[in-house]
Image (tube, rainbow, N blue to C red):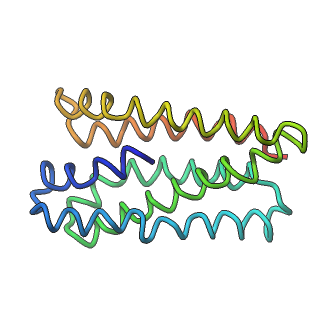
């Protein structure tokens, strides 16, 4: 999530040729539309999966992998494709993030360990925030470029989704 929040404007100026102002406004779609992923994850979890959080998280993370795989192609079609891609990425990252750091952490930790489970999950997120600038710089400044970074996100999303799927029930 932090990679997208902090690096989308740079991606849009470097890779897509947007002006700084245009990149700033366009990248805000990640959060402005992405927050609906939190609402969708909660609704789907409660209404369709009987308050089971992990099916929703795993499905959204697998969806994130698909959207990250398609995003370079969507962005190449123009502004609408780029906005669609980053909006879907926002939905597919905000939903699992909020679910894992909130209700799923409480489900895992039970009443006695909910705070510790939440702390561990949020601590891992903070680690991601620390590592993300290094990862982005490494990927984009080498032969992989910005599109390669999106393909790394596919890998990370699949690695994250698979353990969640094992907790389906």
Find residue 78 and report its image quarter: bottom left
Question: x and y percent of residue 64 in the render?
Answer: 49, 51
Q: Is residue 103 above or below residue 88?
A: above
Instruction: Name the residue rendered at 23%, 41% in the picture.
Output: 146
Q: Is residue 75 left or right of residue 49?
A: left
Q: Is residue 63 left or right of residue 153?
A: right
Question: x and y percent of residue 96 in the render?
Answer: 61, 52
Question: x and y percent of residue 136 in the render?
Answer: 29, 35
Instruction: Name the residue rendered at 45%, 59% in the picture.
Output: 90
Instruction: Name the residue rendered at 75%, 53% in the picture.
Output: 103
Find residue 168 and report its image quarter: top right
Q: Is residue 134 left or right of residue 33?
A: left
Find residue 29 and report its image quarter: bottom left
Q: Is residue 82 above or below residue 147?
A: below
Instruction: Name the residue rendered at 24%, 31% in the picture.
Output: 137
Nearer to us in this view, 64 or 93: 93
């Amino acid at each position: 999530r932090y990679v997208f929040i902090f690096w989308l404007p740079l991606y849009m100026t470097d890779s897509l040729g947007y002006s700084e102002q245009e990149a700033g406004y366009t990248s805000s779609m990640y959060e402005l539309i992405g927050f609906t992923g939190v609402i969708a994850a909660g609704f789907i979890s409660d209404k369709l999966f009987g308050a089971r959080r992990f099916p929703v998280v795993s499905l959204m993370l697998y969806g994130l992998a698909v959207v990250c795989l398609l995003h370079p192609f969507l962005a190449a079609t123009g502004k609408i494709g780029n906005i669609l891609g980053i909006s879907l990425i926002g939905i597919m990252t905000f939903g699992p993030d909020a679910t894992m750091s909130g209700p799923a952490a409480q489900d895992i930790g039970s009443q006695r360990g909910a705070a510790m489970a939440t702390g561990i999950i949020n601590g891992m997120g903070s680690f991601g925030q620390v590592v993300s600038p290094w990862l982005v710089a490494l990927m984009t400044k080498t032969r992989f470029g910005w599109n390669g970074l999106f393909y790394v996100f596919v890998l990370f999303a699949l690695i994250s989704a698979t353990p969640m799927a094992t907790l389906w029930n």
